[in-house]
Each structure stands twice: as structure tokens, then as C-alpha cells.
Image (cartoon, rainbow, N blue to C red):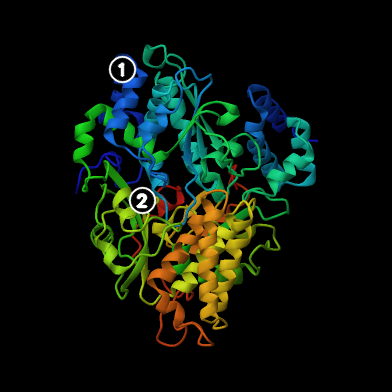
Amino acid sequence: MSEQVLFKNRRVDCRPASLADYRAGGGYEALTKAVRTMTPDEVIKVVMDSGLRGRGGAGFPTGRKWSFVRKDAPHPRYIQCNTDEMEPGTFKDRILVNTDPHLVIEGIVLCGYAVQADHGVFFIRPSYDADARLLERELEVAREAGLLGKNILGSDFSFDIDVHRSAGRYICGESSAQANAIMGKRPNPDKNSHMTDSGLWGLPTVVNNVETLASVPSILRNGVEWFQTLAASPTGDGTKLYSVSGEVAEPGCFELPGGTRLGDIIFGAAGGMLPGAEFKTCLPGGTSTSFVAREHLETPMDFDSMKKAGLSLGTGSVIVFDKNTCLVQATINILAYFARESCGWCTPCREGIPYMKHILERIEAGEAGERDVELLQRVADGMEHAYCGFAPGAAMPVHGLLKHFRDEVREHLDGRGCPFVGEGVAKPGLWTSLDRDETVPDEADSEGRDG
Amino acid sequence: MLPRELEQEIAEMVRETDHVEEKIIDVIYLLQRHFGYFSDEAMGHAARLTGKTLVELEELATFYDFIYREPLGRFVIHVCDGVTCWMHHENGLFDYLCRKLGVEVGETTADGLFTVLPTACLGNCHNAPAMLVNGEHYGRLTPEKVDRILDNLRENADTIPLCLCR
């Protein structure tokens, strides 16, 4: 197994690492080093030099984002730790929080020190209520240990973190929508202001994903050179959490060198296809990324390599499809999700996503012709004119479907309907028996923490 | 009238914060848990205790998945219909639950115990098909497993405390 940095304290029994467990492995050494021996600018420089990029999906350089907070910016300044994670296929942050809550907490405090913030907000979705309770408990533990609150570790740096429970909606994962949600407003995105100038309550706010912040402590402790040796590809900064789900033998979340080849993730870490299943395609980074062609299995899973291949890394959450699964149906499911979760504020998203779904439903039913496929393409192209990234993301699987699986779409046209329906074709929808071994203990399930 | 303890808990929460807006969702959750759903009466209390207007509260209440403006069962069964659960027969899970409970999706059982709802991806894709009940994740569901879960909830309905984000 390659070096485990984020999952260093992952346990077989799924119990989250305690403060003592975390400290035994060098936890909070980075924070001690930072507040006692480093200036905030030095912390930012190390993170910038490391090449760490945001793990929430956009891949923006983390150190650069932090450097946008002006030195003379007003206080209080905020850190928003994004634990919304609602994109289908994505479950890395839940596992990370449940594996090592203090790793995440230390990451937030370090970010707070780097931009001299006063307050952190842990934004967490309602279906992760067990995680919210866990974090509240561990934040108190950190406070009692002097790692959080007034004069952290005896320094003149004071910083505290609150847990903010969301009431749920995928759009709350968008940073400005999330800020609106925290401020008790309807969480529409707001692209007019820069969060680092004017975020929460009009004050400087840095928004980072859980996994991004959790990557920071080890960089400060072990140095930039060490961090750069972790990756498998020249631009695959550090290690990366890849979650794999779908028709694979061993679905789960794996910490692998950044830039591990897509095929190695599926056929190595995740144990290959389920017995009887044959690989057709996957969504490499969650449902707002494109279906891939078979040759893309060779592509390193890092931001730049994926972009060069015309794909996007997204959250690195690989959803694997079997050859007998109808991709038109799969795309209908995905668009139903996006249509339901859209905030509905701008027209392309509100009207366009349901319209794409409608066209696909006609294709699935055999009621569409070649012109409808062209129409679908045009509507998908139009999604880039939406106000925020939600609609272009929703259009990505449609783009992939039409680019790499147009023949499969065409098989549905002109009255033919879905070729995956009928005798001898195993397709989702029949819930007769579980098609994999149960390997997850019941207790882990019922405690809401697993993986 | 609210129970004194709940009234005090909310009043204190509002008093202690610099921004009452930050606490609105928590206030709604507390009231929703007390009333079983975010009823008109609950909304009236929320407005009184936070100083927000009914329109401001309704705007939020109708936006979010986990705020309920209609009555529902003690246990809300959130069945994931994300694409991974879909390929692992989430349809069948819905069918089974609804047949077993004698309801359609969105309906509540006659004894007031269960409501079945579709939900956004639960973040339990490696254990598909998955569902969430009272803050607990359940995955790799089979008919037998679903039976055990329902039986347990039914038998202990009076003693199982309800989580905040129900």
C-alpha cells in the first residue's frame, strides 16, 4: 500500500481516532510549529510551494486562495470548511471526518492561522448528523486541550470553530450559496463578490473542502519536498482520496498517490468489476463529470492530466457502470437529481435541466429521432450560460453520453426504445438479492460510521 | 405554548449569538422535532423567537430537504436515489418498503410511525443501496435487513430519541 497520510489513523473497527490517537502519530505538531515558529505568511508560502490544490472539485491552488486575503483586511475573518458533499458517488469527506476528526480540525486551525482568521464554520449536511455530533464533541476536546479557542497553545492567536447544520440542498456546496445558507438567507449563489474580500457577514472568508484542509498539517510537518514525492504523476499534488462505487467488487474510499491511473483505481484498489459484470464506462469524478471512453482508463487522475484528456477530476469519485446498464437511463437518473437540487434561480438551470431530462425520457421510450439528439446537444451546450457552475456540471454526463456513447443513444431512436429492456438483459430495477458479499459490519452501519 | 425548557433553550441560543440568522436553521430543527413537523404554529414561534418574518422563514422552509411543512411519521425513511443506489436496485428498495408499510412514497403509515421519502445521495455509495433513518445510516440493504430495521424501530419507537436533523 502506498503512503497513507490522510488515512494514517484509519482503523479496522471504523472507530474515529481520538485526540490521543492523533497526537501519538504526530498530530498537532504542525500547529505547534506554526504558532510558535512561523509567521502566517510563511505558512501560506509552504502551502503554495507544495502545489496543494483544492479537493472540492475546482482544483484551485490552495495557497494562492489564502494569499488573496489582504493583510489589512478587517476582522473578524472566517474559514468555511465545506462538508456538504452531496454529489452522487462522493463520500470521501464523511469517511475522513469519521476516521480522523482532529486531522480536519488541525487543518482548519492552520488555515485560520495562515490568514489570521478569528472564526471557523464547519458547514455540514443534515444526513451527516452523526458526524456533526462527533465533531462537536471533538471540538470541545480540542478546546479543553488548548488547541482551539483563546490563545492557542499559549500563543497570541485565538480562533474557534462552530458546527453549522445545513437543512440540505446540493447547491449549498457552492461556496457563495453556502455563505448565504450560513447567513440564514435563501442559498442562491452570489457571483458578484469575492469570498476572500466579502464572504460571511461581508467579511473576508476562505472556503475550503474538508480533504484540502486535512492535507495541510502533514505538509507543514514533513515539508514541501516530502509532499511532492507522494504523487504518482508530475502534477498529482500529494495523495488523493478516490471513492469508488458502482459495479465493482470492493467499493470504498482509497487514499492513493495523486495522479494514479483511472484504470488502476478501478481494477486495482476497488478489486475490478463485480462477478458477471463487464466494464462499460465510469463517471470519474462524481455525477457532474463526463462518462469516459475506454482509452481514458490510462489517464492519470489529477486535475491537469484529466483536463488535457478533455475530462475533469471533480471530487475524484469514480462511479463504475456495467455493460448491461443503459446509459440513457443512468443519465435520466442523474438529471432528475440535478433538477430536484437546483436552486431554480436562473433560467438555463431551472428550465434546461428538466428539458434535457424530458428529451432523454423520450429517447428512452423510443419516441425520439435524430433531431432530438441534436436538440439535446444544443440544450447541453447552452448550460454554460448559467449563473453558476451547477448547470454546466449537470450537462457533463450528457456531453459524455453524446460524445462517447452516441451509438448507444441511437439504438433507442425511431420507435425502437431501450435495447436494455427485455429477457436476458440484466438491468437495474429488479431488487431480488444482493449482488455482493456483505463485508461491512452491522454495528458500523448502525452507528452511522463506516468505511 | 412551548414547553418552558424548549422556550429557554431557543431564547438562550438567540441571545448568545452575534447573528441570529446563523441560528435560524437550528431553531427550526428544534421546533420541528417538538411539533413533529414545521407546522404553522411552529413557524409562529420561530418568528417570535428570532424576530424574523413569516415570509423569511417560509422562504427557507420551502427550500430545504430536511424541513417539513406537512405532517409526517415519527421516523422518516430517507431512501437514496443517487445513481449508484439506482444501479443497485433502489427501485426495488422503494417497492419493498412501500409494500411492507402499505404506503406510497411520500405517505405516512396509519400508525404514524413511518414516512418514506426519496433523498439526495446520502454519501454511503460504497454500501448501496442505502437509506437513512433518524440520523443513522443503513447500507447494503436486503429485504431481510430492512425487516430487521423496521421491527427494531417499531418495537422501540417510544424510547428511541429523535435526532435533530430527522
For the point 31% across and 76% down, which residue is it?
Answer: A276
Q: Give how far apart the Cα atoms at labels 1 and 2 are.
A: 36 Å
Residue that mark 2 sits on: A451
Q: Residues within 10 Å of mark 1 (few under 14, many from 20)?
A: some
Q: Find residue A369 and report its horizontal and vertical position in percent.
A: 53, 82
- Find residue A216 and report its horizontal and vertical position in percent: 33, 32
Disc 1 residue type? Met
Query: On screen, A258 above or below B147?
Result: above
Q: Which residue is mark 1?
A: A38
Residue A168 is situated, as x and y percent measured from the top left of the image, at: 58, 47
Q: Is residue A246 visible?
A: no
Instruction: Residue A134: give x, y in percent of width and height.
Output: 46, 37
Mark 1 or 2, nearer chain start: 1
Mark 2 belongs to which amino acid? Answer: Gly
Residue A262 seen in render: yes
Which of the two residues, A337 or B159, is positioned nearer the viewer here? A337
The residue under the point 35% across, 68% down is: A281
Q: Nearer the viewer, residue A174 or A182?
A: A174
